[in-house]
Amino acid sequence: MNLYRLRCFMKVVEEGSITKAAAALQMTQPPLSILLRKFEEELGVTLFHRSGRNLELTLSGEFLYKQGRELLDFSDHIERQLVEHDEGIRGTVKMGCITSANLFILPNVIKRVHEETPNIVTHVREGNSSYVLQELRSLSIDIGIVRTSVRAEDIHTSTLLTEPLLLALPPTHPLSKKDSIEISDLRNERFLLPTTSQGQGIADDVIEACQNSGFTPNIVYWGTETVPTLLMVMKGAGISFVPSCYKHFNSPDLPVLRPLASPMLQTRLSIITLRNRFMSSVTKRFLTITEEVAQELVSLSNS
């Protein structure tokens, strides 16, 4: 159905005559009459009973007029949504992220998104870096936030932020009272480390630092989730390492977090996307907001 012809038909009905409708549409009467005839031919129905200058709607014309308003309103709504989607202010973003990003970055990102672009809907899938990478490659998500360094030809990686690693200790551990802790002080400790299945992760950096200090860490537990690992540390099962963002996770059930004096270990949070995959304006806008929030968090940490 030609929507322009429908709009002209609606105007004729509302104005009560072709002459008035033509004036309202800023056109002359003959072209409007021809347009109405072509509209009837297009639909295969008669819309008006014609008697001289008088026009009376047929039953088909009455039906079309009642349904036409709803159709035009819906058409206008779709057009507005299309423009908003193209401008990145309406649409859906599917993302995958690790737990720390979901805890400490996304709440601020979602808040900013809803303030600036309330018509963006976000779907989040949480898991370890391997899971996020798998979801990205299967096209189940648009973007991912991971902590491991992914090096692959099909993946584009950009650093979101860099932060120090903190040592997690049981509350009564002797090292918790030391002002300065070095990796060599951990020679006789039991290590609880996060599993690294893709690229270089926290565990790889910790093991390398230990080996550079002359010992191989005694790893008694490999885990995929940070919070359960911290609860194990709290129970005295061993020591672990977490990004410094966890110092903002205020809970009496979490262990003591201390910085390492030497060497200072750091971890990167990265955004991953598929190379050569189309990225919608909505996703680009979401990424921009995420990067802005991350930089603000870095500034607050450094101040």
Image: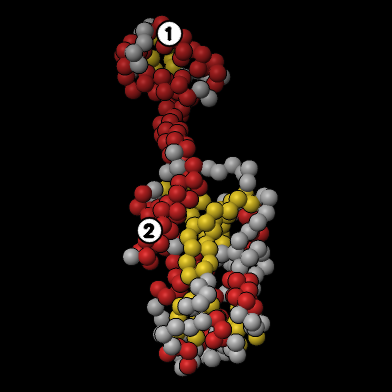
Residue 242 is at least partly visible in this image:
no
Q: Which residue is mark 1?
A: 31
Q: Please give the label number shown on residue 296.
A: 2
12 w.r.t. 231: above or below:
above
Q: Is residue 218 left or right of residue 46?
A: right
Instruction: Compare marks 2 and 1 and give the one earlier in the sequence.
Output: 1
Label 1, secondary structure: give it: helix
The quadrant of the rendering that contains the C terminus is bottom left
Residue closest to the eye, 292 or 87: 292
At label 1, the amino acid type is Pro
Residue at 42 percent across and 23 percent down: it is 7
State the mark number for residue 161: none
- How packed mark 1 is, by other alpha carbons closer than 10 Å (few <14, some 14-19, many 20 or more), is few
**Numbered label tally:** 2
| Callout 2 amino acid | Glu
Seen at 36% across and 7% down, the residue is: 28
Query: Closer to the camera, 139 or 175?
Result: 175
Residue located at (36% from left, 10% from top): 27
Where disc 2 sits, the SS reads helix
Q: Nearer the viewer, mark 2 or mark 1?
A: 2
Tell me how far mark 2 sits from mark 1, CA to CA: 61 Å
Instruction: Residue 68 in the image: state x and y as whole percent.
Output: 44, 29
Residue drawn at the location 63% of the way across and 71% of the way down? 204
Q: Please tell me in which quadrant of the rendered image residue 185 appears.
A: bottom right
Where is residue 221? Give x, y as percent. Answer: 64, 83
From the viewer's perspective, is residue 288 above or below residue 67? below
Give the colouring mode of the picture: secondary structure
Dot 2 crowding, Cα within 10 Å, few <14, some 14–19, many 20+: few
